[in-house]
Image: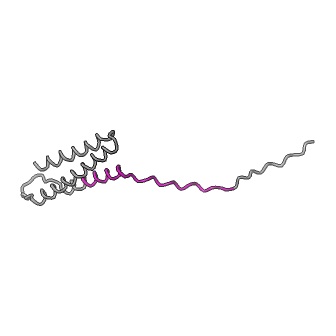
């Protein structure tokens, strides 16, 4: 049951981030702020669920809490990168030659 809740909340968060690409910037920032709050709640719920779990020796599957935490961090990082993108660094310019003089060929005397 907790697994389903976490998956649904993560999918909801991703859908909101993906679907709000055409929103006005103020509204979009408000929505992304709400998503960040929801990610905090999901992370707290996951920590509680991990602490409350009982390991059964015959369990075939277990929930991967570390992977969930990594995914939440990845979503947060993506949102941070979107909200405050790093500026592109200027390229190193090619070295300038500095010599702009063209030597004209010596004209041959006309016969």
Left or right side of 97 for 60: left
Outermost residue toward the front in this view: 26
**Image position, residue 93 (x, y; %):** 56, 54
Outermost residue toward the right in this view: 111
In-image side of 97 versus 70 (left or right): right
Instruction: Locate the C terminus by quadrant.
Output: top right
Most extreme residue toward the bottom is 51
The image shows residue 70 at horizontal and vertical percentages of 25, 55
Examine the image and state in which quarter residue 43 appears: bottom left
Q: In which quarter of the image is residue 58?
A: bottom left
Which residue occupies 16% across, 49% down?
6
Residue plotted at (65% across, 55% down)? 97
Q: Give, as a single range, the part of the protein colored magenta.
A: 71-98
- Image height check: is 27 above or below 44? above
Label tally: 0
Given residues 39 and 27, the one toward you in this image is 27
The residue positioned 22% from the left and 56% from the top of the image is 69
Choose between 54 and 20: the one closer to the eye: 20
Residue nearer the viewer, 10 or 56: 10
Rendering quarter of residue 19: top left
x, y percentage for residue 39?
A: 22, 52
Residue 40 part of the magenta-drawn span:
no
Q: Position of residue 95 (x, y in %)?
A: 60, 56
Q: Does the magenta stretch include residue 96?
A: yes
- The structure's colour scheme is one colour
């Amino acid at each position: 049951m907790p697994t389903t809740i976490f998956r649904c909340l993560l999918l909801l968060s991703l859908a909101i981030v993906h679907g709000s690409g055409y929103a006005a910037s103020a509204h979009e920032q408000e929505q992304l702020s709400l998503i960040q709050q929801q990610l905090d709640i999901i992370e707290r719920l996951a920590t509680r669920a991990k602490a409350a779990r009982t390991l059964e020796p015959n369990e075939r599957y277990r929930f991967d809490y570390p992977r969930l935490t990594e995914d939440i961090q990845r979503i947060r990082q993506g949102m941070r990168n979107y909200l405050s993108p790093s500026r592109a660094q200027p390229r190193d310019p090619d070295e300038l030659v500095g010599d702009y003089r063209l030597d004209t060929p010596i004209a041959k005397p006309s016969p």
